[in-house]
Every structure is written in structure tokens, then in C-alpha cells.
Image (cartoon, coloured by chain):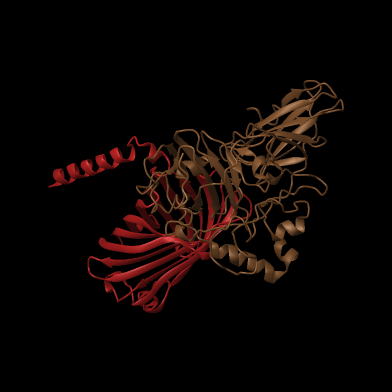
Chain colours: A red, B brown
Amino acid sequence: MTTIKINLFIVVFGLFITNAFAEDIHQDHGGATYHAFWLEAQHGGGSEGDKSHAEWDGWIGGDTHKLWLKGELEGHKGQLEESEVWALYSRNVADFWDLQLGLRHDSQPESTRYAVLGFNGLAPYLFETQAHLFVSDYGDVSARLKQKNHLLFTQRFGFEPYYELNFTAQNVARQSLGRGLSDGEIGVKVFYEITRKLVPYIDLKYERKFGRTASIARNAGEREEDWVASLGIKFLF
Amino acid sequence: MADVEEEGFKSAWQTVSQWGQMRMSPTDLADVRYDAFLMNGQTNQQNWTGLFKPGERVRLRFINASAMSMYDVRIPGLKMTVVQADGQYIEPVEIDEFRFAVAETYDVIVTPEADRAYTIAAESIDRSGFALGTLAPRQGMKGPAPEKRPRSLLTMADMGHDMDHDGEEMNHSEMKMDHSGHNMNHDDMDMDHSGHDMSDSDTAKMQSGWADAGTPKGHKALQYSDLRALKTQPDQRPPAREIDVVLGGNMERYIWTINGRKFSDPAFEPFQLHYGERVRLSFKNNTMMAHPMHLHGMFVQLENGQPTEKLPNKHTVLVPPGDSYSVLLTADEPGEWAFHCHLLYHMAAGMMSKVVVAEYADDLPDEDATTLDSEMGGHHDHH
């Protein structure tokens, strides 16, 4: 079974490569395959001790169709607490928006797979926006909204305010989540672009749980909010 | 913040709001920022130098061979007499500076009288730097570098907006454009697009920010409307057909199109011209970038307000953001000719097309709205 899967993969990948490098002069003017891949790693601490965070976000494809890959790792006191890996098909559906469809696999805090449907794009006032809906293999429905803005003081020096909100449509005892707005974070990254491909930054963020999720955390003797300051670096490949 | 002081809070907010709504930036004059600009392959430190004897007439051929950079060119202390545009003779016109699009060429004659170095300065239109060279009586001399001019800001006029219309959104993608609606009345059109008084910065600001080169009062910047062919144009027939060339795109995604299509699109169609026919190409720029539109194989006659017999020949026509230009073309060179935006990244992204000049057996298809204006469709000239 595994062999068949791999062979199929090779065929599909082969076709993709053949297509991407097809010698058609028309393809030289608008049909090229591009990619952009960002990798961020940061380490810092809050009132609960040290925190590490890594995330990647990138795509390969053309103007209309893209393969979008992303993921996140979060560590606390040397333990991996959260791990997400996403693979999405991303299609340009409006001037500033891609419709995305794919899978997300979490290995921490527990092994769960999600079907993902969402949008990625640029909202008015230049807010980079990601909005995704998830259905887990347990049938739970949740959603995430992320926005950030890239503001420059000079050509290289600037700051990036951002926020993230997580919602869940039902109580998920397994994940200590209560229905409604479950948790969120708001922060700012102050960065200096040494080059576009190498960007060190300082990140300051406030994160907290809301509603029932916050009550669950309180009852378990956990903090429901925290301030985290980190040093990070961002690479573009 | 400076805007708030200059314009007051309300007006500054309107500016922020309008650009924010469009998801664009008024400082977006150039796509690429370069660390250095070169003159004859040399950096400003290497200082390319052309030698002259004082009082001698010197002809300089400026060629904008940049991939992505446009300039304002001047030689402080010298008047330039432009004698050729795109390699075609024009009636001499005396100027202080000219805006220089990618792929354009200008031949100018200067007469340096003094025994000193003159600086040839080509300042990029985003004001991020200069390509500098020197005209000098002896090697090793260097004149002063000119003052950097302030960066101009694009206005709603450059976006094809009336200043009074708040937040009206620009058409970012021409994919869904209805080409049949373009029936421009060219008789009534004001062809003198470049007639803004550049030296009056207040007026220019309310009009086109793009066109505001910061030319000092009393200085003459070359305008397209100044160009007059030296000889009489041999073909003065009125155009038999009018062909729309709509320049479109999406800055954010870096998609650039001609008539809503990239060269790579399956639905791409070339511009088909009967051998010998006379047509008008009407450029309409729906984007916020200026596009130097370049045709291979044949010169076009720029409709710049001069009489038909004096229209200048060009191979590259710079169509400013939100603006329109029209040119006439005699299709007298059979073959397939590249026709594209000469900003090379725009071309690579899809802003490339093809003009096919051939002896077609029949009328060119009427339903092809991208190449045939429905109004003009019945008046083909056959030769």
C-alpha cells in the first residue's frame, strides 16, 4: 500500500515538474512557478517560565493555484506543547483573496487531524488576513482568525502588530476548551530587515483565555493570561 | 505625521483612508529599489566621464537600458536641445530636463562653454538615488552632485479618480472587464495629457502626483506634446480601426495584463492587423504604475496634439498611471512582433503581447472585442 502511494506521488510530482519546466515561450510571460517560504523561530519568557515558538508559512505555485504549507510548534520549559502541520490547496478567487482547502495535523497536545477551509488574503488597510474553519476527526468544529499589518519607519526598520483569535463551536473537554471565543493573543513585533531574507525581531505579546475556556483553566489551577517577551529571527527562502 | 501638519487631520485621514481602502500606497513609484544606478556601466564613484573642448557642441545619446527604473535627467548648468526621440529625428526643442522611461532614447545636443566639470544626473523617479556621470574638459574632474529632490506622492488623480470621490475603489483586475464599453470619442479628447504646468507644484499636486517631477520654476521639462517629427509623416490616412490596449494588473499579487490577459493565459489572443492598414491603438492604463509600452518592428505615431503630419515616431510610449494615450500605426512590416511593457518584471509577469501583421483573407473577426472596436468594425480598409 505504501509503495503504491509513493509511486503515485512520484507520478504526480513528475507531472508537476514536467509542466513547470515545459518549454513554452508563453509560459515565460506570466506562467512561471514561484515560491516564498518564511520560517520564524523565537525564544522568550512569560510569567510561567520560558517559551519557544517556531512557525513556517509558505507556498509554491503560480498566480492562480498554489500549494500552501504552514505549521507551528510551541514549547514550554523544554516540552513540546503544541504542534501543527498544515497542507492546503490555495486558489486565487478574488483580487486580494485565496480560498484554501486542506488538512491540518496536530501531534500535540493530542494527535488530531482537521479538515481546513478558509481564506488567506489582504483586507482593506493592508491587513494580512488568515481565516480558517476546522472540522476535527472527532467532529468538533473550530475556527481561527489572524491578522497582521506590516508598517515601516524606514526601508528596513518597522513593526508588525498582530492578533489571533480562536473559536470553538462546542465544548471540547479533551482539549479543555469551552464553547465560544476560547483564547486569543495580541502583540507587536519590532523588526530590522538586514535583508529581506534575514529579519531579527523583538516580540511582545499578551495572550489570554476567554469565557468557559478561561473558567476551565482557572478550575485546573492554570493561569488564564500571560505576557510573553521574545527574541526572534525570520528567514525567507 | 508630516501630512497631518501640512493638510490638517481630516484631510490626512482621508488620504490614509483612501489608500487603505484600495490596499495601495501613494509612495509606490517604483517596483524595485536598487543599491546603485549605473551610467555606461559605471558607478557614481567610478564616474563615467565624457570629454569636451569648451564651446564645442556635444551630442549625447541617452538610452534607458534599465530593467525597472525610470529617471528625471538633467545636466545642471546646461540647456539640452533634444533632436531625436527613440532614434527618430524631431524638431529641436530646448529643455532643462526630461523624464526618461525604460527603453526610451533621447539624443540631445549640449554646448558646455565653461572650463569646468558638468554633472549628468539621472535621478530615479522614486528618488532613491542617482546615476551620475561627468562632462569635463579633462579626465579626473568631478562636478557637484545635485540636490536630491523630494519624492512625489501619487494622488487620487493618478488612480483615475476624481479628488471629490471618497473611497471609490479602483479596478484591480481587468479579468472581468467589459471591453465593449470603450467607445472613446477621440475628436473631443484632450490629447495634450502632458500639458500640466509642472513648475506650479500646487496645481500639480492636485492633479497628477506622478507627473510632478519637482522641476524648479522657470525650468523647462520635456513633455510628449513638445515632440514634432522633423520630416513630414508619409502616411497621414485616418485610422480605419481603433484597437483598445487596456493595461491592467494587481499590484499586490504582481499580476500584469494587457486587455485582461497574461501572455500565458489560454485565452490570450494577439493583435491582428491587415498588412498595410492604418490603425489607432488606444492605451488605457487602469493601474497605478506607469507602463512604457514598447512595440517591435514598426514605429507608432504618438497622438500628442501636434498636426497629423508632425506626429512624432516612437517605439516606446510611457502611459502614466490612470491615464490614456493613443498612437497611430501603419502596419507595413509583415510578421509577428513583440508588444509589451518594457518594465521587465511586468513583462515577465505576463504584460506581453504580440502584433501579427499579415494578409488576412477575410475581415478580422468582429466578435473579437479586444482587438476590434464595435463602432469601427464595419469600416475596414483593405490594401
Outermost residue to the right: B114
Q: Which of B219 and B132 is in front in this view?
A: B219
Residue A227, compared with residue B355, is above or below; it is below
A146 left or right of B72? left
Residue B48, compared with residue A133, is above or below; it is above
**Quadrant where the N terminus of chain B lies?**
bottom right
The x, y position of residue A66, in whole percent, is: 35, 51
The x, y position of residue A85, in whole percent, is: 32, 55
A191 left or right of B207? left
Determine the residue positioned at 33% across, 40% down: A20
Q: Nearer the viewer, residue A125 or B267?
A: B267
The x, y position of residue A229, in whole percent, is: 52, 60
The x, y position of residue A152, in whole percent, is: 60, 55
Outermost residue to the left: A1
Count of marks, rendered view: 0
Determine the residue positioned at 59% across, 59% down: B159
A17 left or right of A35? left
